[in-house]
Amino acid sequence: MISLRIARRYAKALLAIGKEDGQAETYKEELAGFVTLLDEQQELEMAISNPLYNAEGRKKVLEAVVERSGVSRVMKSFLSLLFEKGRIKYLRDIHAFYDKLTDELANIVRADLVSASDISDETIERIRSALAKKTGKNVKMDITVDPALIGGAVTKIGDLVLDGSVRTQLKSLKESLQRSEVI
């Protein structure tokens, strides 16, 4: 819970700077790039976040990597601040929250679409436009296939779940039949 509060605070601060200088999307890309680098180079993450190494050495490693990565001056300062405050370990959470904030700023909502089988691009576009009409926002969709649904699809937008799967319909039918047998 604490990590979410920390992530929210730092993400909002970075977004405020991004709004002010018009670089919010640039910072989003730079933050994503740095998180990807840490995911790919776990030794690097250990080198900058492990308190068993001395702080000065860890800071030099971070500064060298940041310098070579070619990120903006603001992002260099931001990463340095996270290090100084002992918050570098929350970078993934900060990135995730910043991603959500920049989507809100750009009037974008994310939706997860899980279907029982592959669906055509035309169908995906129809679903996307229906969701956009319903929410009044641009919709970015993450699409996955789950054969366990048997048929149909499940769409999630925030707390809203639209479940049109055969699995759920069969489950509802089973429960309905069980209630009928009891009576």
Image: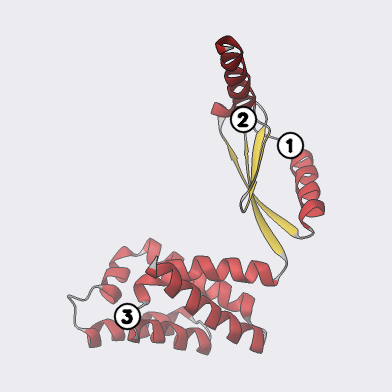
Horizontal side of residue 43 vs 73, given as left or right: left
Graded by Cα atoms within 10 Å as few (under 14), some (14 to 19) or many (20 or more), the crowding at tag 1 reads: few
Q: Is residue 34 visible to us here?
A: no
* Label 2 residue SS: loop
Residue 17's label in the rendered image is: none
Horizontal side of residue 145 vs 131, given as left or right: left
Residue 92 picture quarter: bottom left
Q: Is residue 68 above or below residue 94?
A: below
Query: For this rendering, which residue is in front, 85 or 63?
Result: 85
Query: For this rendering, which residue is in front, 36 or 144?
Result: 144
Quarter occupied by the C terminus: top right
Query: For this rendering, which residue is in front, 31 or 65?
Result: 31
- Between disc 2 and disc 1, the foreground one is 2
Q: Is residue 7 above or below residue 59?
A: above
Q: Which residue matches tag 2?
A: 116
Query: What separation in Å lies between label 3 and label 2 (alpha carbons)?
Result: 44 Å
Q: Is residue 66 above or below residue 124?
A: below
The residue under label 2 is which amino acid type? Ala
Residue at x 42% of width, y 82% of height: 79
Residue at x 24% of width, y 73% of height: 50
Q: Which residue matches tag 1?
A: 120
Query: What separation in Å lies between label 2 and label 1 (alpha carbons)?
Result: 13 Å
Graded by Cα atoms within 10 Å as few (under 14), some (14 to 19) or many (20 or more), the crowding at tag 2 reads: some
Q: Which residue matches tag 3?
A: 86
Residue at x 32% of width, y 69% of height: 45
Give percent across and percent down for residue 82: 39, 82
* Label 1 residue SS: loop
Query: What separation in Å lies between label 3 and label 1 (alpha carbons)?
Result: 47 Å
The residue under label 1 is which amino acid type? Ser
